[in-house]
Image: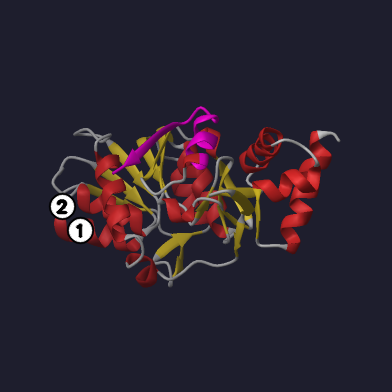
Amino acid sequence: MIPAKRQQLILTALVERELISITELTELLGVSHMTVRRDIQKLEQEGRVLSVSGGVQLSEKITSEPSHLTKRALQFAEKTLIAHAAAQYVQPGMSLYLDAGTTSLALAQALESLDDLLIVSNDLMVINYLIEHSDCKLYHTGGLVLRENRSCVGDSSTHFLHNLNVDISFISSSSWNARWISTPTEAKVAIKKAAVAAANKRILICDSSKYGKVGTFNAVSLEEMDIVITDGNLPESAKSALLQTGVHLVVAE
């Protein structure tokens, strides 16, 4: 049986069951453990499945995001570690873009002592925090306000970023894998693309709980990132998949 056929059978079996073990797949396909693991690795690189201990499951689809207030309480310790690791890449006098999200807010808190930065963000909470706690030069992109996320999107936001050049864009996401940074919100795609295009260096800051989740819309290829910073809860299979993309993986612990 050719690999593509085996991989399609794995996907079909996973539609019927939430999780399948490696042993069960070897019996189903009549091949070795090594062959099954190669097939799973290929599917994981494509963002279609997620390896778990002893088996595999379909990538989790997300169709909406929690509110800003809900997200602030989730993975707080991990976001703090990621933020401090990300801050190590920031030098005095730099210009930065901070994408909307609570990990970006944690990064803003980690940067508050650096007063000679220029910081751009589409996140209202990030800008409000820095207004109160730093002397950085601040720009907000403007645009259509997403109340639940406390951020802005739309043509105005994107146009602002098209005219921008920054040293680093820090990108966040509600869903990512070894292939894509995705989002359930179509309006966020254009601003993430523009933020990536505006930067000399692109860094994904995203905790491991969001790895293996897939939003409806692909925003940015992971290969466009220079660095990925996540936390130590990322599974070993995910680390292997990420390292094969050529991105520099930083695990904040």
Q: Nearer the viewer, residue 21 or 153?
A: 21
Of the 4 image quadrants, the one containing the N terminus is top right
Residue that sits furthest to the top in the current view: 246
Residue appearing at x 41%, y 34% in the figure: 249
| Image position of 65 (left or right of 92) | right
Residue 138 in view: yes
Q: Which residue is mark 1?
A: 131
Mark 2 nearby-residue class (10 Å; few <14, some 14–19, many ≥20): some
Q: Quadrant of residue 152?
A: bottom left
* Spot occupied by residue 30 in the image (x, y as percentages of width and height): 80, 41
Q: Which residue is mark 2?
A: 134
Residue appearing at x 36%, y 65% in the figure: 74
Q: Quadrant of residue 217?
A: bottom right
Which SS class for mark 1? helix
Of the 4 image quadrants, the one containing the C terminus is top left
Q: Nearer the viewer, residue 96 or 77?
A: 77
Q: Quadrant of residue 12?
A: bottom right
Mark 1 nearby-residue class (10 Å; few <14, some 14–19, many ≥20): some
* Magenta region includes residue 75: no
Q: Is residue 209 above or below residue 72?
A: above
* Spot occupied by residue 132 in the image (x, y as percentages of width and height): 16, 61
Q: Contact, CB < 8 Å: mark 2 with mark 1?
A: yes
Q: Nearer the viewer, residue 75 or 140?
A: 75
| Image position of 1 (left or right of 144) | right
* Residue type pointed to by label 1: Ile
Residue appearing at x 63%, y 54% in the figure: 57
Magenta part of the protein: which range?
A: 237-253
* Residue type pointed to by label 2: Ser
Q: Is residue 21 above or below residue 225?
A: below
> Total label count?
2
* Spot occupied by residue 119 in the image (x, y as percentages of width and height): 29, 46
